[in-house]
Image (cartoon, rainbow, N blue to C red):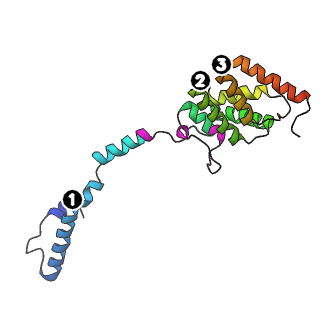
Amino acid sequence: MSLAKLFQLPTSASMPGREGALRLATRVTMLALVPVLMPGCEEASGPDVARTAAEQATKGPELPRLKWLDAHNRNTPERWLASREAKVDLDENDPAVLDLHIKLNEAAQRFGDATRMIANRAVQLEEMLAEEGISEHAPELIETLSSTATALRQREGFGSLSQHYFNLRKQGVGREVALEQLKKASVLLRTNGSLRG
């Protein structure tokens, strides 16, 4: 039934007896519901929409806001790290995600650690360095620290090497010198036969 028909009041001639009274009651009820039902049909506006839009703008992308990737999170470490760098939620097939997939897997092979643990430690190291006024990003740290490890698996895990790197940097040792010291320590470990099996 159209709204025009709904608003058209019946005449006594068009509504005989009980049937007319029932139609009249139905139309009156429908008219009473129009103010309640019609706002849902209009385009959303007003303070509720403004609040929702403001919440979404404040909320922003999900992945860059994560501080830690726990074991229950279904996102891959490479997607999380790439999204943090881009400050947007990236797709799993994004080139930056694919690049980090390779770097994380290389690091996992070098250190014998899980990629999620390496990603978490790299983010933690990034934040610790930032507190010292040193700007280095997690993906860069993964690649850099992996390059200091010997081609064989490192006795120390990624977390331990990260801590050594942080200590050197905190003491004021420059990036290149710190990396060179870590490489020398890695070679010493290899020549002393202290490698993981």
Mark 3 vs mark 2: in front: 3
Calculate the distance from the C-alpha at mark 1 to the C-alpha at mark 3. Answer: 70 Å
Q: What amino acid type should be assigned to the residue bearing mark 3?
A: Gly
Q: Main secondary structure of the magenta part?
A: loop
Which residue is nearer to you in this view: 167 or 140?
A: 167
Mark 1 vs mark 2: in front: 2
Residue 196 point in image, percent of width and height: 86, 38
Q: What amino acid type should be assigned to the residue bearing mark 1?
A: Pro
Residue ID at (16%, 69%)? 28
Do the residues bearing badges 3 and 2 touch, measured as CB atoms within 8 Å? Answer: no
**Label 3 Cα neighbours within 10 Å, binned few <14 / some 14-19 / many ≥20:** few
Mark 3 highlights which residue? 172
Visible residue check, residue 45: no
Visible residue check, residue 138: yes
Determine the image quadrant of residue 128. top right
Magenta-colored span: 57-79
Determine the image quadrant of residue 150. top right
Judged left or right of residue 128, residue 47 is: left
Judged left or right of residue 111, residue 25 is: left
Calculate the distance from the C-alpha at mark 3 to the C-alpha at mark 2. Answer: 14 Å
Magenta stretch: residue 73 in it? Answer: yes
Mark 2 highlights which residue? 135
Which residue is nearer to you in this view: 96 or 158?
A: 158
